[in-house]
């Protein structure tokens, strides 16, 4: 069973593009390093809300995102880019279509 975490937050006015740029850097490094056991998607909603969904195949394993330098840079200053601190919640996959397989 995968370990799934959903993180949601709203960017401050004027911070959305910078936040998106930092997220794209994370995906560029993920493409380069291609860590095993990770499924990850980040979405930007039209109201300025960002939603990240990370799934780690081995629930006992550390999230491979923690080994990505661009992810650490993304996390630096996240509080200043957000209206409120990001909220993370464990999630259970009820169904999916070509996202986690």
Image (tube, rainbow, N blue to C red):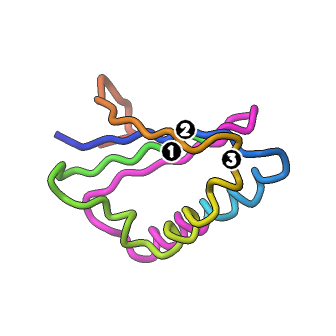
**What residue span does the magenta drawing correspond to?**
25-49
Q: State which quadrant residue 80 falls in.
A: bottom right
Q: Nearer the viewer, mark 2 or mark 1?
A: 2
**Residue 1 point in image, percent of width and height:** 16, 39
Residue 34 on the magenta segment: yes
- The residue shown at (75%, 34%) is 46
Q: Given contact means CB atoms under 8 Å apart, are the residues at marks 2 and 1 in contact?
A: yes
Q: CA distance from mark 2 to mark 3?
A: 10 Å
Residue with the mark numbered 3:
82
- The residue shown at (53%, 66%) is 26
Q: Is residue 25 shown left or right of residue 71?
A: right
Q: Earlier in the sequence, mark 2 or mark 3?
A: 2
Residue with the mark numbered 2:
8
- The residue shown at (84%, 51%) is 14
Q: CA distance from mark 2 to mark 1?
A: 7 Å
**Residue 75 point in image, percent of width and height:** 55, 62
Q: Residue furthest right?
A: 14
**Residue 69 point in image, percent of width and height:** 48, 76
């Amino acid at each position: 069973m995968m370990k799934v975490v959903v993180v949601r937050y709203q960017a401050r006015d004027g911070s959305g593009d910078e936040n998106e740029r930092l997220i794209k850097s994370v995906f560029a490094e993920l493409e380069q390093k291609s860590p095993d056991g990770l499924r990850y998607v980040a979405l930007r909603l039209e109201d300025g809300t960002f939603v990240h969904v990370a799934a780690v195949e081995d629930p006992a394993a550390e999230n491979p995102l923690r080994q990505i330098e661009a992810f650490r840079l993304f996390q630096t200053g996240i509080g200043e880019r957000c209206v409120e601190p990001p909220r993370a919640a464990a999630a259970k996959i009820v169904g999916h279509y070509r996202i986690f397989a």
